[in-house]
Amino acid sequence: MTARPELEQQVLDRIESFRRRKPTLREERITMAHGAGGKATHTLIEAVFLETFRNPLLEPLEDQAVFSVNGARLACTTDSFVVSPLFFPGGDIGDLAVNGTVNDLAVAGARPLYLTAGFILEEGFPTADLQRIASSMARDAAAVGVQIVTGDTKVVERGKADGCFINTSGIGVVERDIHLGAAAVRPGDAILVSGPIGDHGITIMLARGELDLVSDLTSDTAPLHALVSRVLDATTAVHAMRDATRGGVATILNEVAASADVSMVVDENAVPVRAEVRGACEILGIDPLYAACEGRLVAFVAGEAAEVALAAMKNDPLGREAAIVGTVRAESPGLVLLKTQFGGTRIVDMLVGDPLPRIC
Amino acid sequence: MRFVDEFRDRKIAGDVAAEIARLADPGRHYRFMEVCGGHTHTIYKHGIEDYLPPNITLVHGPGCPVCVIPMGRVDDAMYIARQPGVMLTCFGDMMRVPGGDGSFLDASAAGADIRMVYSPLDALRLAQRNPGRHVVFMAIGFETTAPSTALTLLKAAADGVSNFSVFCNHVTIVPAIKAILDSPDLRLDGFLGPGHVSTVIGCRPYQFIASAFQKPVVVAGFEPLDVLESIRLLLKQLAEGRCEVENQYTRVVPWDGNPKALDVIRQTMELRPYFEWRGLGFISQSALKLREPFAAYDAEHIFRIPGVRVADPKACQCGEVLKGVLKPWECKVFGTACTPETPIGTCMVSSEGACAAYYNFGRFTRERLQEAVR
């Protein structure tokens, strides 16, 4: 008779190979889970969009595409914002739109140049609120040194949207001779995060006022281009960077582990999380690793350059609390493992379902 | 963070684990059932099994509120949600539970108004804010959640709210434990008692487990050190030849429970003659329904629910998993046809479900894990 652990491992190996099959979309209708940034979102993107639009630039499913035009390497990205509430402690939908788009360019090592902004407005939306959102966008764009150079406005009947939705696109130029991307991540790389995680996601949950929880927490929405520049100036050993938005740090680790065919081991004790975020997560039963950020970088850097990269992050005002949280491994590719605070080990999987409301 | 970190201390965990290793007889195999899904979640989330010698097996029990809801009740709730003017509210865990024809998430996508709430009082508040709608709260859970449903009913009556009702699916823990003890195909050496249920019912209701069935019980808290310490207490009882109900979770659980909470349950609810449990079948006097004076708030009175019994999918072995007869990975469809994103059985839905906890956190044998993190 086969020993039980061996039998169990056989079952688990079968499951892992099953998980690597091409995803198929089974649902007849879109559910909220398709927008939550977890497994369902990935299935939707791969089964519908990647299959239909397939091309070499889209295939890596990075936050942006990088291509050459007349010798210049350009980065191009797009993003949509449907956060509720529109105004929250630490920012508003306009801040998310500019910073989020800038960050998607920055993590490719690009210098952000120009943004576009498309507004979908609901009949009855206060113009003062729109002015406030536009002012936030103008201020953030000026701070980064980008311009919002074209746009679009649509108005839909009352009830057909929720106040204000924003779509953006962004163009940047990659001036360094670097090719960042999940596929470049190697066993032995260190995993860095640029600051405490989950501030934005928990701030939004509390701002919705449905939980009878109060805190001083504010969103972490911020542009990361300067921090990224410092890191890239300090070392050429950066392999990939992502900004942790919807789905949090856990989702990024899973995406990169799958793309690069590597595993990751993260030390829970090393992951910076504010006490307020931890407290709210404990009460709500959420893992901070899945809570959204809007101004936090996750970087994969060759192990020997990890300390240099960390020092560079810490020199930036947005990276003071940066930390090395784990390492990339070759064994059991595709898996993200967490050494828990308690001293045990467990898997950190892609998020399933929709535990969080509209956060970006 | 206070009240959390002290219960997750690695050093103390190492000390307790050493004591466990000393107490466990190497010539014997121990099988302890954690009754409550909250414990299952804790065990996998913190990796507690890493501290246990190989001759201690933790068997996952039936105490997961979402897992024990039969498909027929999900379909009944969906029927209610489709009635004109109805807003159905439920805890987040219920949204993905498959009924005979999809989940609440699917029904919501198809146009039904189904909303997630964190408390039945939130559902009542929704009713007060939406006088044009009839708000139904799908109440699930053991004695842990029944008092909050009871209080909400009392408040609804006191405030004279007329557009609110409860679809009551509350169950009681003791008949489920009895059903497991009566099950012929299960050999257990002791129980980790359900901590949060016990805050309400106290520790006395478990006496029969120790006296009639000769199995030790330790009512356990939900932090990882609570669970580890409770395993140590079970082993200590066995080593000393004792068989008692002990309370490890004294900081929360009074021996006699919470009389006020029991009183509000008694005021508003009474035992049903029988109730269907997913995978376990019909168990007599195992669930609660609203008392007659609250009929105006009873969704089962207000709506003519079909009450159809839907057989569990053939492939699904949730019953065996809930009874602890099968480990999640031993189920035929585990991880292939049945996954957290496309669950067939309820155990794969709730974060407290044994299959979901194992799939999400523990999809790995200990040997392979040690190899990977070395």
Image: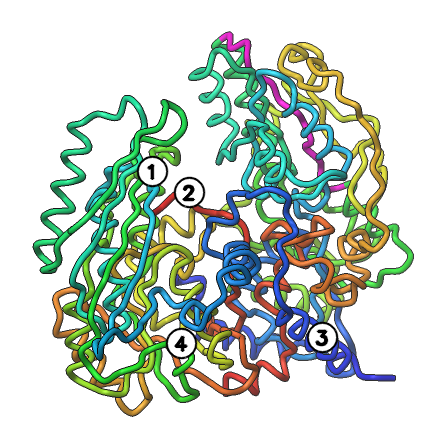
Q: CA distance from mark 2 to mark 4?
A: 28 Å
Q: Which residue is mark 1?
A: A84
Residue occupying image coordinates x 73% and y 28%: B76
In this view, A144 is above or below A12: above
Give the percent coordinates (x, y) of residue A150: 19, 48
Query: Contact, CB < 8 Å: mark 2 with mark 1?
Result: yes
Res A12 quadrant in image: bottom right
Q: Which residue is mark 2?
A: A357
Q: CA distance from mark 1 to mark 3?
A: 41 Å
Residue occupying image coordinates x 73% and y 83%: B26
Instruction: Point out which mark residue B298 bears.
Output: none
Chain letter for the residue marked with disc 3 in the picture? A
Under mark 3, the amino acid is Arg
User: Can residue A200 be seen at all in this image of the molecule?
Assistant: yes
Residue placed most toward the observer, B76 or A338:
B76
Say which label, 2 or 1, has the lower sequence index.
Answer: 1
Q: Which residue is mark 4?
A: A182
Residue placed most toward the observer, A290 or A120:
A120
In this view, B25 is above or below A305: above
Q: Give the secondary structure at mark 4.
A: helix
**Which mark is in front, 4 or 1?**
4
Instruction: Point out which mark residue A14 bears.
Output: 3
Query: Contact, CB < 8 Å: mark 3 with mark 2?
Result: no
Magenta range is B160-174
Residue placed most toward the observer, A96 or A172:
A172
Say which label, 3 or 4, has the lower sequence index.
Answer: 3
Q: Give the secondary structure at mark 2.
A: loop
Give the percent coordinates (x, y) of residue B228: 57, 66
| Circle 1 residues within 10 Å: few <14, some 14–19, many ≥20 | many
Q: CA distance from mark 4 to mark 1?
A: 31 Å
Under mark 1, the amino acid is Ser
| Circle 4 residues within 10 Å: few <14, some 14–19, many ≥20 | many
